Image (cartoon, rainbow, N blue to C red):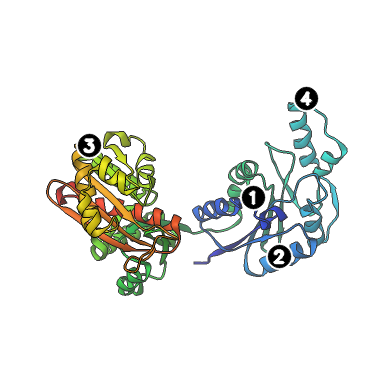
Amino acid sequence: MKVTHAHIITIGDEILYGQIVDTNSQWIGIELGKIGVKVVKKTSVGDTEKEILYCLGEAEKNSSIIIITGGLGPTPDDITRNCLAKYFDCELTINDEALSDLLRLYDKYGKKPTEKNRRQAMLPSCCSAISNSLGTASGMWFDRRGKVFISLPGVPYEMKLMMTSHVIPKLKKRFSLPFISHVNINTAGLAETTLAKKLEKFQRALPKHISLAFLPRLGEVRLRLTAMGESKLDLKNNLNSQVKKLESILDNCIYSYDEVSIEMKVGNILRSKKMTLAVAESCTGGYLSHLITTVPGSSDYFLGSIIPYSYDVKMRQLGVKPETLEKYGAVSEPTIIEMANIVRAKFNTDIGVASSGIAGPGGATADKAVGMIWIAYSDKFRTVTKKLQLSDDRLINIQWASRALLNLIRISLPIKARK
């Protein structure tokens, strides 16, 4: 089975300067994967003829499909058309189809194009125009020696419509493409290296047409199984079989599939079991509550939170015993146990959770380093605690600890409630 490779090129100094984020190549990569095209490289290049021409040459060496976005506007720095004309050794001439589209668009808004605007209808004579119904920049399709070059505007909404309406259907006719299927398995509780070690035997035994990728995130690792073949149904069955094997190996480390976040998963469990939750978060400063409330319908199970950041608020507002704080300190297991139990009682919920730690960059002591964070889960049956030793980065620590608390809720729920 022959794999068709693609190279995506984004053009514009503004991308290299970081003034805009390149979302085009991400979106194009996803859409190409859906039709069985494998993206092997993505390149960003500035508005320089020499660099653009070099990039085109390199892309042609390793790919059958080259998709270019950007540099098609009416200003002097928009040089993509000129570069493509030079690369394919043909002249820029008025393209009747592109001109007709441009005039139709201006007529729609009761305007007349300037001479500068009309120049956007000048395309290399060796290309076919790709209609742009939302803008003035026509796309271009070049087909030479089995390689296809596609040039599209950098404006995302214009590019996306042109891709879905014209480019994707044409690529499917032009190339004999296999099916590519993905399954994303979301895990929490194991570091990437630990997970990889645990899955060594599984990965070695995978069929040749299925691959496994590890995609680490804060406190989580997403596993991606990718299968390529000629039968969509066979691929689906193959992937389902491998997912079952993963489930038997990883058990409770898997919390969801595809785009279901851990806050969504926990919320779904609590809602289905009619359980309620309250939060006392110190070092996470409300970030856990933020994650919980990003889920629509979270009011069904989330009753509220308190942020007892200071010693005084921990004692007077929450109710932690002064002697506990004096003897053990705010960042300690005894304190976090009291916080979780008290917040559950105050809000009269089924579950109470709490966080307390040293987010950094300051605040460390001789026995408590930056990144040390205690988290706790409490219900009427038990209290579970965990000590985290994270990084020196304050924001990472806040986000990581919040996600770790969500996972602690998930794995600490009574077994019947988890299912």
Task: Tell which tag, 4 or 1, sits nearer the viewer.
Answer: 1
Horizontal side, residue 144 vs residue 215: left or right: right
Task: Tell which tag, 4 or 3, sits nearer the viewer.
Answer: 3
Identify the residue position indicated by label 3 in the image.
347
Which residue is nearer to you in this view: 216 or 321?
321
Residue sitting farthest toward the top: 110
Identify the residue position indicated by label 1 in the image.
20
Residue depicted at x 24% and y 59%:
328
Image location of residue 192, percent across then percent down: 37, 67
**Mark 3 or mark 1, earlier in chain:** 1
Task: Tell which tag, 3 or 1, sits nearer the viewer.
Answer: 3
Which residue is nearer to you in this view: 87 or 252?
252
Image location of residue 229, percent across then percent down: 44, 61
What is the three-letter code of the residue carrying label 4? Gly
**Numbered label attached to residue 110:** 4
Image location of residue 252, percent across then percent down: 24, 58
Residue depicted at x 67% and y 62%:
147
Cα–Cα gap, marks 2 and 4: 40 Å
Identify the residue position indicated by label 2 in the image.
55
What is the three-letter code of the residue carrying label 1? Ile
Cα–Cα gap, marks 2 and 1: 21 Å
**Mark 4 or mark 3, earlier in chain:** 4
